[in-house]
Image (cartoon, helix red, strand yellow):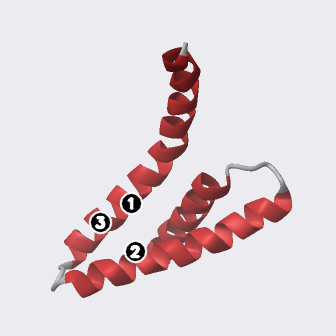
Amino acid sequence: MGLGMVVTGLACVVIGEALTNSRSLGLALTGAVMGSVCFRLLVALAMNVGHLQATDLKLVTALCLFVALAFPRLIAKMKRARPAAST
């Protein structure tokens, strides 16, 4: 159970970092709280969708973390590609 709490905490911080993308301490703390709320909402939604087994819930949370990790890079890539497309 202790390892699950560490993973949950890291997931909340990663999601919060993806949401705020800031180096400021205040925004980083706000992002961690927002990430915690988002992560718990995603887990609650996944559990309400149907009768999930523990492995299925782990898969859903892993996919959400993957999206949170990839999201800032995709946004940056789209921002770099936009000026080139408009000229």
Residue placed furthest toward the top: 87
Q: Is residue 1 in sight in this rendering?
A: no
From the viewer's perspective, is the residue at label 2 or at label 3 nearer? 2
Q: Which amino acid does label 3 sit on?
A: Val
Mark sitting earlier along the chain (1/2): 2
Kindly tell me whether residue 9 is visible in this rendering: yes
Which quarter of the figure is the C terminus placed in?
Answer: top right
Amino acid type for the residue under numbered disc 2: Leu
Q: Residue at x 18, y 80 (%)?
A: 52
In front here: 16 or 75? 75
Q: Are marks 1 and 2 in contact (CB under 8 Å)?
A: yes
Pointer 1: residues within 10 angstroms few (<14), some, or many (20+)? some
Residue 76 x, y percent position in the rendering: 57, 33
Disc 2 crowd rating (10 Å Cα; few below 14, some 14-19, many 20+) is some
Which residue corresponds to the image point at 63% horizontal and 55% vertical from the top-left? Answer: 17
Badges 1 and 3: C-beta atoms under 8 Å apart?
yes
Looking at the image, residue 78 sits to the left or right of residue 67; the answer is right
Within 10 Å of the Cα at label 3, are there few (<14), some (14-19), or many (20+) other Cα atoms?
Answer: some
Residue 43 relative to residue 27: left or right: left
How far apart marks 1 and 2 lie (CA) works out to 8 Å
The answer to which quarter of the image holds residue 62 is bottom left
Q: What residue type is labelled 1?
A: Cys
* Secondary structure of residue under mark 1: helix
Q: Name the residue under label 1.
A: 64
Residue matched to label 3: 60
Q: Position of residue 63 (x, y in %)?
A: 33, 57
**Could you tell me which residue is drawn at 55 percent across and 43 percent down?**
72
Give the secondary structure at mark 3.
helix
In the image: residue 39, left or right of residue 58: right
Q: In this view, does 69 lie above or below 55?
A: above
Query: According to the image, label 2 marks what residue?
Result: 42
Q: Are marks 2 and 3 in contact (CB under 8 Å)?
A: yes
